[in-house]
Image (tube, grey):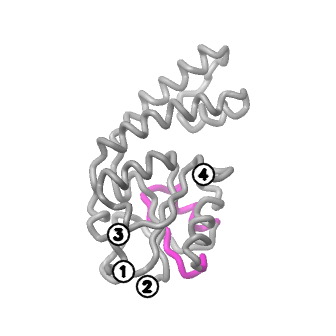
C-alpha cells in the first residue's frame, strides 16, 4: 500500500546517534543528586519524568540535549536515509531533542528531503502520546489515515496506533514506491 505522506522516527531509523544512553542516565542522575533529588531509578525516561515532578526539567533537558547534539554530529547514516528524497511529503517525529534531530539531518545532508521536525521538546508531550506525530501530519497537510509512521520501537508503533496512522518497522519499510 502507498501512503500520501511518510513520517520517520530519527534515531535508529534514518540515523544512529552516537550516544551512550547509560552515560546520559548517569549524568542526569548526578545532576538530580546535586540538586537534592534522590533518583531512585536508572532508566533515562523515568529520570526525565522525575525531573518534571521535582522542577528540574530544564536542566535535565539541557544535559540530555548536550549528549544528543554531540551524538548527532557523530551519527551514522542508516540505509533508509539513502532512499530519500521521496515523491510524497516527509517529516520527522522523534524522542530526541528537535535541535539534535536537525543537526543529524544537516550532518547527513538530509535537511532538504525532510519537512517538519518534531522532537520531544517541540510539543507538550512525547511519544507514545500522538501529539507530536499528529503535529507533523498536520504540518504536512496530510490525513493521518493516509500517512505511514516508520520507526524502530514498540513506542513508535504505539504512537502510530494512537495517532491513527499506519506503522511500518524501519527494517521492513519498502521505500521504492516513494522515491522522487
> Which comes before the other along the chain, label 1 or label 3?
3
**How far across and down, in percent of the image, does residue 84 sit?**
32, 70
Q: Which mark is residue 172?
A: 3
> Quarter-wise, where is residue 48 in the image?
top right
Q: Which mark is residue 2?
A: 2
Q: Nearer the viewer, residue 117 or 162?
A: 117
Q: Secondary structure at mark 2?
A: loop
Queried whether the magenta region covers residue 151, the answer comes back as yes
Q: Which residue is mark 4?
A: 122
- Cα–Cα gap, marks 3 and 4: 28 Å
Which residue sits at x=53%, y=18%?
A: 30
- Cα–Cα gap, marks 3 and 2: 14 Å
Which residue sits at x=26%, y=62%?
A: 79
- Density class for disc 1 (Cα within 10 Å; few <14, some 14-19, many ≥20) is some
Q: Which residue is mark 1?
A: 178
- Density class for disc 2 (Cα within 10 Å; few <14, some 14-19, many ≥20) is few
Q: Which mark is nearer the camera, 3 or 4? A: 4
Q: Secondary structure at mark 3?
A: loop
Q: Secondary structure at mark 1?
A: helix
**How far across and down, in percent of the image, does residue 101 sit?**
44, 51
> Which comes before the other along the chain, label 2 or label 1?
2
Queried whether the magenta region covers residue 140, the answer comes back as no
Q: Nearer the viewer, residue 145 or 141?
A: 141
Dot 2 and dot 1 residues touching (CB under 8 Å) = yes
- Cα–Cα gap, marks 4 and 2: 28 Å
With 87 as the anchor, is 64 left or right in this view?
Answer: right
> Quarter-wise, where is residue 177 in the image?
bottom left
Tell me where the magenta segment starts and ends, as one range.
Answer: 143-162
> Which comes before the other along the chain, label 3 or label 2?
2
Q: Quadrant of the C terminus?
A: bottom left
Amino acid at each position: 500500500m502507498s501512503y500520501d505522506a511518510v513520517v520517520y522516527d530519527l534515531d535508529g531509523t534514518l540515523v544512529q546517534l552516537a550516544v551512550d544512553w547509560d552515560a546520559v542516565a548517569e549524568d542526569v542522575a548526578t545532576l538530580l543528586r546535586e540538586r537534592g533529588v534522590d533518583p531512585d531509578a536508572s532508566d533515562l525516561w523515568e529520570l526525565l519524568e522525575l525531573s518534571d515532578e521535582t522542577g528540574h526539567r530544564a536542566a535535565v533537558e539541557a544535559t540530555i540535549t548536550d549528549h544528543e547534539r554531540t551524538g548527532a554530529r557523530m551519527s551514522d547514516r542508516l540505509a533508509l536515509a539513502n532512499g530519500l528524497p521521496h515523491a510524497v511529503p516527509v517529516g520527522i517525529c522523534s524522542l530526541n531533542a528537535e535541535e539534535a534531530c536537525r543537526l543529524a539531518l544537516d550532518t547527513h545532508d538530509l535537511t532538504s528531503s525532510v519537512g517538519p521536525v518534531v522532537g520531544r521538546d517541540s510539543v507538550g508531550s512525547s511519544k507514545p502520546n500522538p501529539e507530536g506525530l499528529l503535529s507533523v501530519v498536520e504540518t504536512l497537510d496530510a490525513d493521518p489515515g493516509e500517512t505511514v509512521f516508520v520507526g524502530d520501537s514498540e513506542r513508535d508503533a504505539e504512537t502510530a496506533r494512537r495517532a491513527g496512522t499506519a506503522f511500518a518497522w524501519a527494517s521492513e519499510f519498502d521505500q521504492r514506491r516513494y522515491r522522487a
